[in-house]
Image (spheres, rainbow, N blue to C red):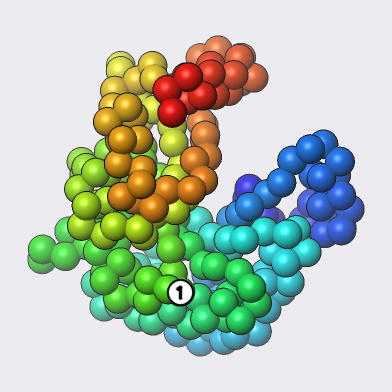
Amino acid sequence: MDIHLTNQFWGLSVQEFRDTIHSNGMTTPSGHYGLDSFLRKEGNKSDLTHVLEVAQGLDQKYVIIPSISADLRTSIEDFKRIAEKLNQAGEMCRQAGLKLAYHNHAFEFEDFNGQNGLQIFLENTDKDLVDFELDIYWVVRAGKDPIALFDKYPGRFPLWHIKDMSKTNNELNTEIGSGTINYEKIFQRAKTAGGEHFIVEQENFEIDPYQSLSQSYSYLKGKF
């Protein structure tokens, strides 16, 4: 769930939004929270405090950083500096009874003389403080192998974003099981990855969105 704190929750307070979720038989184990203000050099702990309060109020387990602004990630040194910030945020989350996770796109795989941003994050963050929400589509689109990441960094990926890649245009999503990503093979390594939460996400639709969601859900439920 993406959280836009400045707009609250479609006019609802945190308590009202949580009650709405629960009254419909749902839960929200995680939320996406933009934390650029905290991740900047001048950012401080107060930039994270309200996010933790909201996540607690929604009974969430994970605070997820969904992306990083381009101006914050221009070099491998930037990624190393942010990795330290992730550790700090992870400790604050731990003290609040939460867990921090980072969500990737493709830019984290940009090569900097043999290193990339995701590698820096994985190797320079405390595994007890920082988890990862691996977006399988973006890993594949970047030309990388999700299974290789699972094997190299076992247990670091308890959350996944899963959307398939269109057979005709790799810049577009499609229903799970209808595209080019071999999810059957990938899910066979879910235990190695530490997978717990598998979140269907799709941004482009050639059919009705609810039909699309139903199709992806049915595929996953029948297979795994």
Picture coordinates of residue 11, whole percent (x, y): 87, 50
Depth order, front residue of 151/167: 151
166 to 40, vertically: above or below = above
* Amino acid marked by disc 1: Leu
Residue behind mark 1: 129
Depth order, front residue of 148/41: 148
Q: Is residue 159 visible?
A: yes
Depth order, front residue of 171/14: 14
Q: Residue at x 55, y 67 (%)?
A: 99
Tag count: 1
80 to 214, vertically: above or below = below
Q: Residue at x 51, y 46 (%)?
A: 197
Report whether 51 appears left or right of 127: right
For the C terminus, the image quarter is: top left
Q: Is residue 33 visible?
A: no
Q: Secondary structure at mark 1?
A: loop
126 to 149, vertically: above or below = below
19 to 70, vertically: above or below = above
Mark 1, other Cα within 10 Å: few <14 / some 14–19 / many ≥20: some
Q: Residue at x 35, y 35 (%)?
A: 187
Quadrant of res 223: top left
Q: Residue at x 89, y 53 (%)?
A: 16
Picture coordinates of residue 210, whole percent (x, y): 64, 19
Report whether 189 appears left or right of 215: left
Picture coordinates of residue 61, whole percent (x, y): 62, 61
